Amino acid sequence: MAAQDNQKVITNNKIPVFHKKTKLTATYILIVVIAFYILSAIFTEAYPDRIITGLPIVLGFVINDFFPPNLGYYARVTPALIETWNMALLATTLSAIFALPLSFLAASNINKNKVFYQFIRIFLNVIRTIPELILAVLLVAFMGIGAISGIGALFIFSLGILAKLISETIESIDPNPLEAIRATGANVFQVIRYGVIPQVLPQYSSYVLYVLEINVRASVILGFVGAGGVGIILRQQMSLFNYANVSTIILMTFIAVTIIDFVSSRVRERLL
Amino acid sequence: ACGAGTTDEETTDPVETEEAGEAAPEETATEGEEITEIRMGFIPSQEADKIADTVKPLEEKLTEILGVPVRAEVMIDFVGLVEGMRTGQIDIGFLNPFGFVQAENRANVEVLVKAIRRGEDSYVAQYVAPADSELESIEDIVNTPGLVWAYADTLSTSGYLFPASQLADMGADLTTHFSPLVVGGHDNAILALIDGQADFATTFDDARDVLEGDYPDVKERLKVIGYTEPIPNDTLSVRGDMSDEWKQKIKEAFLAFNDDEEMIAVMNEVYTWDGIAEAASADYDVVRAVFEKFEEDLAN
Amino acid sequence: MIEFKNVSLTYPNGHQGLKNVNLKINDGEFIVVVGLSGAGKSTLIRSINQLVKPTEGELIIDGVDTLKLNDRKLKDTRKNIGMIFQSYNLVKRMSVLRNVLTGSLGRTNTLKSMLGLFSKEDINLAMTSLARVGIEDKAYRRADQLSGGQQQRVSIARALTQQPKVILADEPVASLDPPTSHVVMKDLKKINKEDGITTLINLHFIDMAMEYADRIIGMREGEVVFDGPASEVSEKTFEEIYGRPIKEDDIIGAE
Amino acid sequence: MIEFKNVSLTYPNGHQGLKNVNLKINDGEFIVVVGLSGAGKSTLIRSINQLVKPTEGELIIDGVDTLKLNDRKLKDTRKNIGMIFQSYNLVKRMSVLRNVLTGSLGRTNTLKSMLGLFSKEDINLAMTSLARVGIEDKAYRRADQLSGGQQQRVSIARALTQQPKVILADEPVASLDPPTSHVVMKDLKKINKEDGITTLINLHFIDMAMEYADRIIGMREGEVVFDGPASEVSEKTFEEIYGRPIKEDDIIGAE
Amino acid sequence: MNTKIQIEKPKKGSRYWLRVGISAAVIIFLYYIALTQTDLSYRGSALSPGALLERLFWNPFFDEAVLAKVPSYFGYMLETLAIAYAGTLIGSILAIPIGFLAATNVSKYAFVGKWILNAIRAFPEIMFAIIFVAAVGMGPYAGVLAIGINSIGMLGKLYSEVIESIDMSVLETFKANGASRLQTIWFGIIPQVVPEFASYAIYRYEIDVRSSTVLGVVGAGGIGAPIIIAAMQRSWEQVGMMLLIIILVVSIIDFISTRIRKRLV
Ligand SMILES: Nc1ncnc2c1ncn2[C@@H]1O[C@H](COP(=O)(O)OP(=O)(O)OP(=O)(O)O)[C@@H](O)[C@H]1O
Ligand SMILES: Nc1ncnc2c1ncn2[C@@H]1O[C@H](COP(=O)(O)OP(=O)(O)OP(=O)(O)O)[C@@H](O)[C@H]1O
Ligand SMILES: [Mg+2]
Ligand SMILES: [Mg+2]
């Protein structure tokens, strides 16, 4: 067969590297993405020249204001950071616990009841959508001022993220073992416990740590509503234009983030 | 205390300039500086009980008067505004007294006018306590140790700085006498009283109005037991490196609002200003003095 | 005893997977189902434990028409039916022993099983089952660390731990190389003989079917076209099943 | 010509993968390397293009001792050596044609290749290579949509597009079923004959080795224990290579 | 069948137990601190949740003043969407090189990349916004830049994790081919990761839509300032209406993006 085919192929001079259809789809996607970008850019006046003229100002901040950090300020930051950490830890723990059942309900391959499934997804969308700041304001209105409101805001917010991410992981697991376990006469809880959980555990723990980091950073915003932690002093020092102190706060947040990142990558390595 | 204003016709009159920019849609008006657009940052003061989230009417009016497009952006926090004024990206800023004092240090801004509210160019902070509280006056507060004191945050002029200064002057040791409860907003301070978390709160006069939607009986539940000394009202400032002509022009434009019913109505709507008065940096010395007392503590 | 009475199965997309199947499967038989790809072998086997549900007819297991059972009763029926899959279907990240123990879930209290509290008997049984397929030394390995043949033997051990009366195997050796396939088939045969467990196996390879089966069921386009002892299989039978004379490839074991 | 002169290879963990290997491989030969698992077959083959680097001796390709080459020169040598892997190693989400075209990367300017500007000759060559292994109609399919045998043929086409003087294949058929294996081996043999490309193949299956090889190299524990034409392979040779008499399983193609 | 099979459960070394012990101790300590040091007393508010929810999500539909503002709210929302889109796109593209830099399996200097990403994530987004307001003035553009750089932090991390999980055996082929490093990345890695990258970028867009509200605080545009002001005013009807709009729009985006992402992966 080869000889003839060779001939045919070689005489045909125009062989595209990409199939016409592939090319067309890729082009369409590119056009849509760019068109939206241009629209947004016009709308937001996001023209590159402006950032080029603004660049010296950005650098000025780094060189003149943030550097050098006032390291002596750490004594004030530490307790605040611990407070922030505590709120993040508790909120993450709660959301890690509650996200699990929710995400099973939000996974189409586990929850076969279409209506209930959609309801859960919409519910998750709603809680994920509310900006954390507004969430905090609302919770303060509900529950009064204090760490509880802050933790509550972080909890609700991270519950939405976690449940969504985990439910997507659940939806993409290997369905075959589930079938096998179902065939042994196991009930749905047993199928989840022995079929699903072992498969999602690594992703689950990696997402939980990811959310922990998000929560540590989000509590900065909660300072705006008096929910305590590093947010309050960050805002205070910003308002006083004490950038050397702000710089210290950022530096210490950086250390916290790096530690979480390190732990998270070690855990991932272990579990995968 | 209203300054004489120029009329609309005068300001919209095109003035020839040598460096009229190509980009300028309309003529600029000074020899010293070419301004093709005025950018105005607008911070709704926490001390006002009613704020509009739009400044469109103000934008339009100023565009008309100043002859260049004016663009205003509403923001919550003054840090961005001040930094923008420092780098020349923002021309006009509405700043609260404390913000102005900070901005003058950081960005060398210059105050042009200040607000008149209810006929005054200053306001006061109030001490609020539950209606059934034993506290009847500021003296009672100073004489009762261990009270839980709710306030918005330590940088709030009326929420903390002025009352704290007053209390300190009256002999209370701020570090030991109270147990402070920082709640993030004036409304929250009032809320803390309603919820029984605090013994008294300090807010602007009268923060209880904000809560009336949630608690129609808030004024019966909470009583005002005292006021601070007057705090100068919030300012309208411009960046320091603006040419004097433009400063003058902007100042006059705003002062002219005093003669313009419609604009005063607008100003009232967006910022509860019912008049505009000329202001000088010295008017804010009292704020500076109070701030200086706390500066050391706050910075560390 | 399992009895198909006029069983038909139409998939939701309208495809007819089984057409009026009538079969009687006696206790302790070792049956191999052969047929071309798409003939309906899997459909037949999977309808026994209702991983797919026949749409017509009666499927009687031990005197009960299982098609009429509710979910609870169906679970009870499934407990008595072990299943082995082509792709083993082990939970990769779990240890071999735990995988095998999942075979006992059907009779373990939900709460206890959630806490991982299996009875001593079940753990013993799981270990014994592993020993029967000769891989008890791998009990604490993670399932994905085993070779294909070993994984399939784990899945047999899992089925054994279920203490089923019936074992269904859907192409249990299709992913394995020939020698390993023989080991697995021998294991299955041995268990069938020793415990008298009724065994139904789908196979592609006719030579293997002939080698192990007591009885062969040939399928074609959803219908049973042959049913008889291996000895009765003739050149003609092949033609019936495959719609064409037998070719070398059928013997080597290709699709 | 490829010449191993006293080549030894010690892995970083101290394991000796090759022990004093001496071999001469002539241009155009079709050689099959057999041996038990762990015998060092992969190590031998991979040391030719230095995916693992021998620690001692000389490895002379076309007169040059490649162990002394710097990175640049080594790359040039590698361009002349095509490689085929057991697991195909295709980029799954790329089209078949693009996968095949990556064979020409070594001679394509980096920037051009990134912009997808392959020369007309290379594209033609890629298509021709696909045609030679009989799957030119799949050119625009995504690689992961093909069956295993087809994927392996894509990887052969990729090696061909490289226009190599040597093709190395590390167990190219181990993941394939027997009939497909034969198709792939036939393809390799055909190419070897048509283009005169020196071909080295690792195989587990001795029957297959005998069927296709001009010359068989037997390895055991890192040493070459047999080297000669397929016709010289005897019962004794098996014993040398496997350390035990030949068994049925070796023939069917087990490990 | 009754004989008990004795297979020793593999013994974990003492170092293993030491590790487990230390980890457990650290975790218990952390929770102990968190639970004792945080003021968890719940005082409750006199405000009934029912009344608040009613004001948030029911009354707005009957409030003329709020209804009249709906078009302008949609305008703000549109601005937010545009800010988030431009920002996410910039961020998702710039995150690619940093993601590669931070991936341990392709980069020798992965730690540098990881540190850069951690530093970006440690920087409060509000601070970015302030800096960009100073650099380019108030308004949406500052928001775009703040969102953009902020997205790099998270996307870069996620990207690098995707890269770290790719099939490395494919890369060996390219080594054997004599392909250059860049070619290896372009042909060997990029096709493997593009769908995941795109999927994460789309996911990030949703997050950015939400987080761009925070930027309203410093005048970086969008629906942020109006909603926060309304909340400060305790004008729950307005807050509720804006929330409903955000929820509606984000749900639509979520719906579309889920479908796109399903097709990508
Ligand atoms: N879920 C389903 N929906 C629709 N049709 C299906 C479904 N499952 C199987 N089929 C169809 O039913 C027919 C029988 O399928 P079945 O899987 O039973 O065949 P098989 O004999 O097991 O084939 P193979 O040897 O390929 O496994 C096939 O034509 C198949 O396409
Ligand atoms: N990277 C490595 N580090 C240490 N030892 C290795 C490494 N790669 C291979 N070995 C060891 O070298 C020996 C030869 O391995 P090699 O892969 O060449 O065997 P093989 O003949 O190809 O076996 P198989 O048939 O299983 O592929 C084996 O004992 C193996 O464990
Ligand atoms: Mg089947
Ligand atoms: Mg090998």
Image: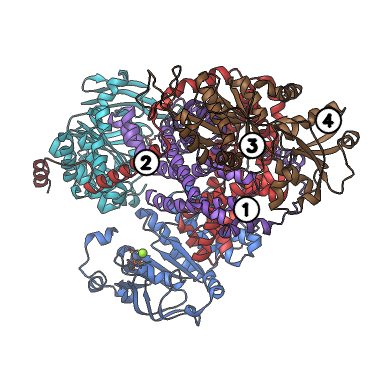
Chain colours: A red, B brown, C blue, D cyan, E purple
Q: Nearer the viewer, residue E90 or E83?
A: E83
The answer as to whether the residues below labels 4 and 3 share one chain is yes
Q: Which mark is residue B167?
A: 4
Ligand 3 rendered quadrant: bottom left
* Quarter of the figure with the N terminus of chain E: bottom right
Q: Calculate the distance from the C-alpha at mark 2 to the C-alpha at mark 1.
A: 40 Å
- Amino acid type shown at disc 2: Leu
Q: Is disc 2's CB within 8 Å of ligand 1? A: no
Would you say E231 lies left or right of C79 here?
A: right
Neighbour tally class for label 4: few under 14, some 14-19, many 20 plus, Cα within 10 Å: some
Answer whether residue A270 is visible to the viewer in this image. Answer: no
Neighbour tally class for label 1: few under 14, some 14-19, many 20 plus, Cα within 10 Å: some
The answer as to whether the residues below labels 2 and 3 share one chain is no
SS category of the residue bearing label 4: helix
Q: Which residue is mark 2?
A: A39
Q: Is disc 3's CB within 8 Å of ligand 1? A: no
The answer as to whether the residues below labels 2 and 1 share one chain is yes
Residue under mark 4: which chain is it in? B
Q: Who comes first in sequence, dot 4 or dot 3?
A: 3
Q: Which residue is mark 3?
A: B45
Q: Calculate the distance from the C-alpha at mark 4 to the C-alpha at mark 3.
A: 24 Å
Q: Calculate the distance from the C-alpha at mark 4 to the C-alpha at mark 2.
A: 56 Å
Residue under mark 3: which chain is it in? B
Q: Which residue is mark 1?
A: A98
Count numbered badges in the picture.
Answer: 4
Q: Calculate the distance from the C-alpha at mark 1 to the C-alpha at mark 3.
A: 40 Å
Would you say B239 lies left or right of D189 here?
A: right
Nearer the observer: mark 4 or 2; the answer is 4
- Amino acid type shown at disc 3: Ser
Nearer the observer: mark 1 or 3; the answer is 3
Q: Which mark is residue B165?
A: none
Query: Where residue B12 sits: x, y (%)?
Result: 44, 30
